[in-house]
Image: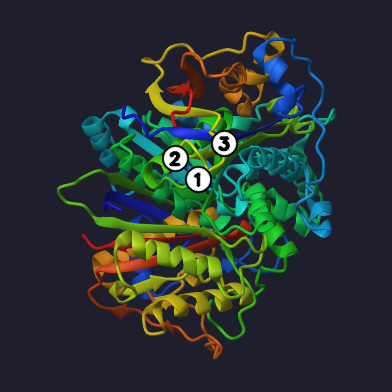
Amino acid sequence: MTTLAPMFIQGIGLLGPGLPSWPDSQATLRGDSPHQFVPTVLSPPPRLPPAERRRAGAVIRLAMAVAEEAIAHARVDPQTLATVFSSSGGEGSNCHSLCETLASPNPLISPTRFTNSVHNAASGYWHIAVGSRHTSTSLCAYDGSFGAGLIEAATLMHTNGEPLLLVAYDLPYPEPLNSVRPLPDNLGVALVLTSAPSLGGQSRSIAELRVEPLPARLAAPVATCGDVSLDALRTGMPAGAALPMLQGLARGVDGAACEMVLDYLPHLKLKIRLAAPFI
Amino acid sequence: MQPVAITQHTLATAIGIGRAATLAALRAGRTGLAPNQFLDAGLQGWIGEVEGVDAVVLPARLNEFDCRNNRLAWLTLEQDGFIDAVAKARARWGAERVGVFLGTSTSGLLQTELAYRHRQPDGSLPEGFRYAPTQNTYSVAAFASAALDLEGPSFVVSTACSSSAKVFGNAARMMAAGLIDAAVVGGVDSLCLTTLYGFNSLELLSSDICRPWDAGRRGLSIGEGASFALLERDADAPQGWLLGIGESNDGHHMSTPHPEGAGAIAAMRAALASAALQPQDIDYINLHGTATPSNDAAEDRAVAAVFGTRTPCSSTKGATGHTLGAAGGVEALICLLALQHGLMPGGLNVQTPDPQLQLNYLRENRAAPLRAILSNSFGFGGTNASLVLGAA
């Protein structure tokens, strides 16, 4: 397949069980300390005005937390970024609550719950919070949702070159849905990506990232995490598909470039190449 | 952008299943809306139900996908030779070079809503409930990929009511980037309780039939619909062209459009720029036109700001209802029918035109040769998409 133009990673956000932030997850990702499953703590997003902050459910808290971390890391004005949001299912507890109410006679559902149930709720709140009219999309490819976001981000970058924010995030369902779609916890990953190695005179980017979709029959095996507990997150959470790449970034790319295959769809994988950014 | 050939297309809504039935209903000015009798949803209002969805039987090999949304998808795929056209494209380009990008807002959520009514004594969902192929937002694209034997990149875009307009952009970009040579795009949204009661909770459902551009409009009528278009890198005899797409965000409010339509203006201007056309090159505009007081007022200002007030325009939601995540694709393909048959469909259900609205809103069908049409789709969360479609 054709090779897409390279992207440059300017900022990273990470929040999940035992992965409290990008800097505080370095030792775990490098393999210096074993991964421990400590449940994710979600906080109200400070950027939202008080009324919106109260209404912001778990999906908004998770997506905005990693988005905030990535833009702070990149030192970029979020108003200037297009966005790609990708999730397997949005806010599970909200969906459960709506279905419960709708199973009762003469259901009255809350308008806030309904508004927050749309798949693009996180993107909508984010663009309102940062006052951005740049294009945004909200994708889903079930367990391949991170791959969908990454291939769309790489395609957007290749075709228009504008800086963008990629946010992948997944949240668990309460029972009874948890039994049919078991997701162990919340996990979010965000990347600020640009088409040029430096961002407006700031320090150089973290790494160059190339993405190449490959039919599964031609691709090397999907990269694993090594650490058993971390690898359970990779296979158990759709956004966890990003973890081998984050491990590569945590180990650093100043030496040799590193190539690996990330999971996307059963028949299609994403080969990525991480290298030191050339300036 | 490089124009993309549309080599086959089909659709189903309350006004008809397939292109011929849709065209006949548009020509007759017939609405598909009827007073709500969906399940036991005791909401006063009108809905656009596609006839016969309940009776659709999926092929045995696709049984795990069985739910109302995928039945509607299959019913539609079977129209107008669409499956054969995709088979030809698959043979020409290879299954790995044909993408599948579909829009939906609720996918097979009805299946889950009904399952919650039949929970077992221990609270668990009924035996045989399947999450991934029905409820999950991606299920409709997984279903279409399996049904059409395609192995290219695929995902669902779920940006509420702009979803199935935006997928045309995803496909065009992937073609421009060289990742694929063809794509199946469109969208499917079927009736479910979440959207009926949800829009009702926001007081956006009209108890009367929806009346876009009417002075007394009170909100929308929800419909269901499906559309599929086959886009290819090149074609000997295309049915029409995707000429441009513009996308933007309001960054204003989750469920209310920007009052001046700032995001909508940006989307329309970007669509024209991407098609390398001027406003006067557009012969007809298919409006988002939901019939909520705020949408029609904001869209009227936005369209006037870009095009002035002379370009003929209408909303076809008085016929189909608002098919939500399917609306962008359905309306793009209504535009393609309009281009093919020189028909500007008049907007239905207007009793008293709103004197506050200034656009040249068609209330009757008008026949004229058409070269280029713009179609608007705006969604919750402030997502806007405008498509420019061109005659073959």
What residue type is disc 1 on? Pro
Report the disc number at residue A195.
2
Q: Is the residue marked by circle 3 packed among few (<14), some (14-19), or many (20+) residues within 10 Å?
A: few
> Where residue B238 appears, x then y in whole percent?
21, 52
Q: Secondary structure at mark 1?
A: loop
Q: Tell me how far mark 1 sits from mark 2, CA to CA.
A: 7 Å
State the residue position of label 3: A203
Which chain letter matches label 2? A
State the residue position of label 1: A163
Q: Earlier in the sequence, mark 3 or mark 1?
A: 1
Report the disc number at residue B295.
none
> Where residue A25 appears, x then y in whole percent?
72, 22
Work out whether A173 lies above or below A133.
Answer: above
Depth order, front residue of B163/A64: A64
> Where residue B374 appears, x then y in whole percent?
37, 67
Q: Are marks 1 and 2 in contact (CB under 8 Å)?
A: yes
Depth order, front residue of A260/B193: A260
Depth order, front residue of A13/A77: A77
Left or right relative to B303: residue B238: left
